[in-house]
Image (spheres, grey):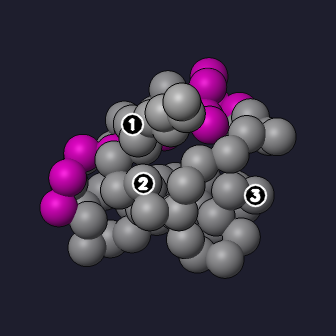
Amino acid sequence: MLTLKRNEVCPYANKCPHNKNHECWGAEPTRFVEYKCSFVENGKILENKFRNPLDKTGQMKVIME
């Protein structure tokens, strides 16, 4: 997991497939909260995962009933 501090931009933002439309909040330099990205592990980008583009912390959970 990659933890980014407030206003810290993800070092993988330009090559990450999860940021293809510039919708990842980890790549947002004006973010005011800590962001935890579970798509990066040991310096490798994990693919075939989904995150809601509205998730501003990287910790949003989807609850289905």
**Is 50 on the left-hand or right-hand side of 57?**
right
- Type of residue at label 1? Gln
Q: Nearer the viewer, residue 65 or 4?
A: 65
x and y, in percent, of residue 60 in the image: 41, 41
* Numbered tag placed on residue 55 in the rendering: 2
Residue at 54 percent of width and 30 percent of height: 65
Q: Earlier in the sequence, mark 2 or mark 3?
A: 3
Secondary structure beneath label 1: loop
- Spatial CA span between label 2 and label 3: 16 Å
Residue found farthest to the front: 65
Secondary structure beneath label 2: loop
In the image, residue 24 sits, relative to residue 12, either above or below, namely below
State which region is magenta: 32-44
- Type of residue at label 2? Asp
Residue at 55 percent of width and 71 percent of height: 23
**Residue linked to disc 1:** 59
- Spatial CA span between label 2 and label 1: 7 Å
Secondary structure beneath label 3: helix
Q: Earlier in the sequence, mark 1 or mark 3?
A: 3
**Is 29 on the left-hand or right-hand side of 39?**
left
Few, some or many residues within 10 Å of mark 2 (<14, 14–19, 20+): some
Between circles 2 and 3, the one closer to the viewer is 2
Tag 2 and tag 1, C-beta contact below 8 Å: yes
x and y, in percent, of residue 1 in the image: 49, 26
Few, some or many residues within 10 Å of mark 1 (<14, 14–19, 20+): few
Is 37 in the magenta?
Answer: yes
**Residue linked to disc 3:** 17
